[in-house]
Image: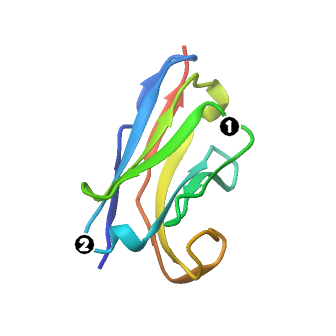
Amino acid sequence: QVQLVESGGGLVQPGGTLTLSCAVSGNMFSVLAMGWFRQAPGKGRELVASMTTGGTTNYADSVKDRFTISRDNAKNTAYLQMNRLKPEDTAVYYCNARRLAYPDMWALKSGMDYWGKGTLVTVSS
């Protein structure tokens, strides 16, 4: 069973930086695509950033040029570096790991689909 554990959330001032981590248990990490979602109060869950097993990354327009997704296969960990944070980035951030039907097609899942429990990011002065 694959388990995902997020860390790194917290309170940060506008313009600040946070890096979230997602530790993935088991030995499947290298074949899983990774993504970060977020859910703000009163809103639905949205995809923030994704990285396929082929290395293709994709970002929501609202975070482009500010957030960077990365992974370290040796550590079974994915990251989300968040720069120039804004109050509207306040949300619970969730890590997602999935098996893809094709290496570079994030939207086409193939069986495995796992979620972490989330970590809260609050951007406020």
- Quarter of the view holding residue 14: top right
Q: What residue is pinned by disc 2?
A: 26
Dot 2 or dot 1, earlier in sequence: 2
Task: From the viewer's perspective, tell me whether residue 120 is left or right of residue 124.
Answer: left
Task: From the viewer's perspective, tell me whether residue 87 is left or right of residue 92.
Answer: right
Determine whether label 2 and label 1 are within 8 Å by CB. no
Q: Position of residue 6 (x, y in %)?
A: 36, 50
Task: Tell me the amino acid under the disc marked 1.
Answer: Lys
- Quarter of the view holding residue 108: bottom right
Q: With respect to residue 8, does 108 lie above or below?
A: below
Q: Position of residue 89 (x, y in %)?
A: 61, 34
Question: What's the distance in space between the residues labelled 2 and 1, CA to CA?
Answer: 31 Å
Quadrant of the frame with the C terminus: top right
Instruction: Identify the secondary structure beneath mark 1.
Output: loop
Estimate how packed mark 2 is, as few (under 14), some (14 to 19) or many (20 or more) residues with alpha carbons within 10 Å.
Answer: few
Most foreground residue, 119 or 21: 21
- Quarter of the view holding residue 23: bottom left
Task: From the viewer's perspective, tell me whether residue 116 is left or right of residue 102.
Answer: left
Most foreground residue, 38 or 42: 38
Q: With respect to residue 37, does 125 lie above or below?
A: above
Q: What residue is pinned by disc 1?
A: 64
Name the colouring of the figure. rainbow
Instruction: Identify the secondary structure beneath mark 2.
Output: loop
Task: Tell me the amino acid under the disc marked 2.
Answer: Gly
| Residue beneath the point at 25% across and 73% down | 27
What residue occupies the far bottom of the structure in this picture?
111
Task: From the viewer's perspective, tell me whether residue 80 is left or right of residue 24.
Answer: right
Q: Position of residue 28 (x, y in %)?
A: 32, 74
